[in-house]
Amino acid sequence: MHSSEGLAGAAPDARWNALLTRLRGDSDALFQAFLEQVRQIPPYARGLVPTERMEEDAARTFDYLLRRIAGAPVPKRLSAVGTEIGRDRAHRGVPLNDLLTAVRLNFRIVWDALRAQSDPSDGPLLVERVDRVWAAVEEHALQVQVAYQDEGALIARERQGERSMLVAALLGQLDGPDEPPGEPDPDAVARVARALAVDVDDDLLVVVAPAAAGSQLRRAADALAAQGRPVHVQALARHAVLLARWTGAPEDGPAGIRALRAGLGGVLDSVPCVLGPLAHGVAKVPASARTALRVVDALPDLAGPVDPYGAWLPVVAAELSRTGIGRELVTSVLGELVTLHPVERDRLLETLRAWARTGSVTEVARPLCCHRNTVLNRLRRVSELTGRDVTVPDQATVVLLALACWEALERP
């Protein structure tokens, strides 16, 4: 403790200002104490903030704080110190909690220095004025926090914008022309990988949903991000595409899709969407997305995460119908079948589709609650109307494809 009877006996404000003046005269000790303690906080210990920058900020911070505590004018060069620190640390990637821990060290350092400079008789004064020290530090901390969060939001928007531009370039005209995507440029692939925070050869989950389900897809993306996966949702004109780093589903084809569904754990269950084939590397994303997108467009009553490998028939029918071949197929194959009364037509089609799934008259009759002979009679009736024996696989396939084209053409 310092002994200074003259100062101790002065009026409280004068004594308070005298103590603060002493601290300002020994500001080097303040920021050296700060630097010693702040280096115990992990991001600072790792050197995220250069020593020179920390020293400069600490010196300005204590100058600012001591002026605020004393109620003295703050010069313009110091008025934005909290804002500048918040913005700087946001760019350097210092976590907010660690930053605020560092900022609040200032209270303990200033308080300990005041106690060291004071006399025993200053005890009541320190107790009376402690709230001023705390208020100044908290005001500074709030400035730092607000600036950090504002800058962090700006950085996130800029990065999101950059990601969106790069992914849009990678996907190309996915929502537009029919030409299949060409092989992506390796440099473009590398840029997308960096923007997505993945390696170029990482496996990527690709999910496509109608644009109307974009908000649901984003909620699913948030759930995946909470698992620690890099995730991005790309908005297209008519669709939304989710990309996420994936592990644990090395198989391709239907088995790979089943593994994906199991690994998702229900995250996408409420989202009308289609799982694309797992993209083995960023360069494979466009092809996977195009496959899933075509299935989305072919299934108007989309629900759940759909397996694209179970939807080839409506996809092919949709493609044929868009080119005009579908209408020719309907006319030449289905004949009078589609002009029947809807009740009879639906009964025949229900039986035909059940037969196509199982190939067993008994298995068809059971769920339809009818006799085996009824099933055979209905199949025979379809054959009469179409001129094709639907008990023969290749002829049944033509009829089923024509039916899928008819449904695609009838769709609003």
Image (cartoon, rainbow, N blue to C red):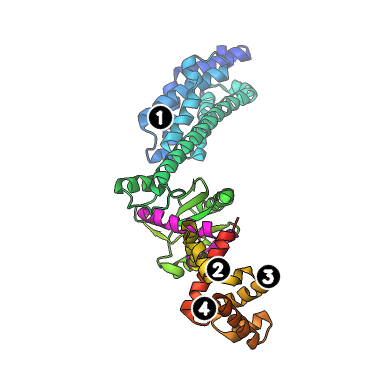
Residues marked 4 and 3 touching at CB (< 8 Å): no
- Residue at 52%, 48% in the rendered image: 238
Q: Earlier in the sequence, mark 3 or mark 2?
A: 3
Secondary-structure class at tag 3: loop
- Residue at 51%, 69% in the rendered image: 332
Range of magenta residues? 282-309
Residues marked 3 and 1 touching at CB (< 8 Å): no
285 part of magenta stretch: yes
**What's the magenta bit mostly, secondary-structure-wise?**
helix
What is the distance, in whole Å, between disc 1 and disc 4 at their CAs?
Answer: 83 Å
Within 10 angstroms of label 4, few (less than 14), some, or many (20 or more) residues?
Answer: some
Three-letter code for the amino acid on which mark 2 is drawn: Leu
Q: Earlier in the sequence, mark 4 or mark 2?
A: 4
Circle on res. 341: 3
What is the distance, in whole Å, between disc 4 and disc 3 at their CAs?
Answer: 20 Å
Q: Nearer the viewer, residue 281 or 102?
A: 281
Q: Report x, y in % for residue 319.
A: 47, 59
Three-letter code for the amino acid on which mark 4 is drawn: Arg
Quadrant occupied by the C terminus: bottom right
Q: Earlier in the sequence, mark 4 or mark 3?
A: 3
Circle on res. 403: 2
- Residue at 61%, 23% in the rendered image: 132
Q: Is residue 312 visible?
A: yes
Circle on res. 232: none
Q: Which tag is nearer the camera, tag 4 or tag 2? A: 4
What is the distance, in whole Å, between disc 3 and disc 1 at their CAs?
Answer: 83 Å
What is the distance, in whole Å, between disc 4 and disc 2 at their CAs?
Answer: 13 Å
What is the distance, in whole Å, between disc 3 and disc 2 at their CAs?
Answer: 16 Å
